[in-house]
Amino acid sequence: MKKYTALALGIMIASGSAIANSKLVIAHRGASGYLPEHTLAAKSAAYFMGADYIEQDVVMTRDNKLVVLHDHYLDRVTDVAEKYPERFRMENGKKRWFAIDFDLAEIQGLSMTEGFNVSSEKFSKESAQAIFPERFPLWKSSFRVHTLEEEIELIQGMNKSTGHDVGIYPEIKAPWFHRHEGKDISKAVLEVLKKYGYTKKTDKVYLQCFDPNETQRIARQLMPAIGMDLKLVQLMAETSWNETMVYTRGKPSPYSYDWMFQPGAMAEIAKYADGIGPWKPFLVDSSSTKDHLIITPMISEAKKAGLEVHPYTFRADKGRIPTYADNFEGMLDIFFNKVGVDGVFTDFPDKAVEFVKQSEGKANKKS
Ligand code: G3P
Ligand code: CA
């Protein structure tokens, strides 16, 4: 992991940081700890668990429709490999079924399930191995991929029927890939957001993206051109994840995120974004222990630059709690109350909402 070198180590509690909002609970792919990620069922569950924002990862289909899927391929959460065995591309020696090669009607004819891996070369539902074996069982009940518009209508519909005001948190997935394929996904997402009334920073939406070139393009070109000014969140990754690629003479190479871990980076990001979405270890070093918490300077630099900080991903599954925390609530306590983050992406919004209620209750009693 890249990190601030000379400054990094030692306990640094982010004192005096100006936290803009109360603690936000962002339902990561919906209530994905309980129901298959990015299904409307997972979104409804998150809504009624009291999440402040519900996340949508967005990719584009061959017929230019926006669908809610974490990957720009379909084979980790659907039976596409069984229904369309020949419609794959090879990527890094692996068969992949890209959403961009299918029309919406074809995609909506697929069965959708929990995330899985397939160990054998040939797909079968029986050989699929759940990534989280203790979560919702594979291939049970009936789920399908839905569009961004369907999900916004669901959330806005529930806002109307309940009187609540839950926000949306769309992520533009792999814009570099979509644009290489001739599709301007960011422009299409902005048009949908505008159609549904999300146009300004005070609206209940954060728009997020891992690709810094694209986040800057959204801030400086696309939004001004169509009269929009939304809150933008720059997601952060390690270069080695190949999360963002750059094409030079048609050949992709990884975008280097290294600059984001240097002093001064947060001030640079603040020139075009309102917040950052860091991986948890970018804020709390993984070598931390229960007795010695190592908080990197990223949070204080981000706060100094006026950025909100929403780290990912808070999971309560067995084996997913960092060794420096006792349990899920202990991990939230560290991030909210010691690091000073403004919100968390979590697969377990019910637990995070309960934690926030309890901790705000305690704070009120003290004051
Ligand atoms: O967008 C925040 C968080 O969701 C980033 O991780 O890979 O789950 O989209 P990912
Ligand atoms: Ca995401």
Image (tube, rainbow, N blue to C red):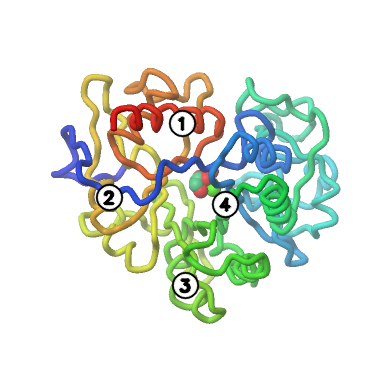
Question: SS class of the residue under badge 1?
Answer: helix
Circle 3 residue: 217
Amino acid carrying mark 2 in the image: Ala
Circle 4 residue: 167
Question: SS class of the residue under badge 3?
Answer: helix
Circle 2 residue: 18
Q: Which of pointers 2 and 1 indicates the residue nearer the eye?
A: 1
Residue closest to the far left? 6
From what the image shows, is residue 147 above or below residue 188?
above
Q: Who comes first in sequence, dot 2 or dot 4? A: 2
Q: Who comes first in sequence, dot 2 or dot 1? A: 2
In the drawing, what numbered circle is on residue 357? 1
- Disc 1 crowd rating (10 Å Cα; few below 14, some 14-19, many 20+) is few
Give coordinates of residue 313: x percent, y percent.
47, 37
The residues tagged by marks 1 and 3 sit, at their Cα atoms, a distance apart of 38 Å
Residue 14 sits in which quadrant?
A: top left
In the shown orientation, is residue 223 left or right of residue 101? left
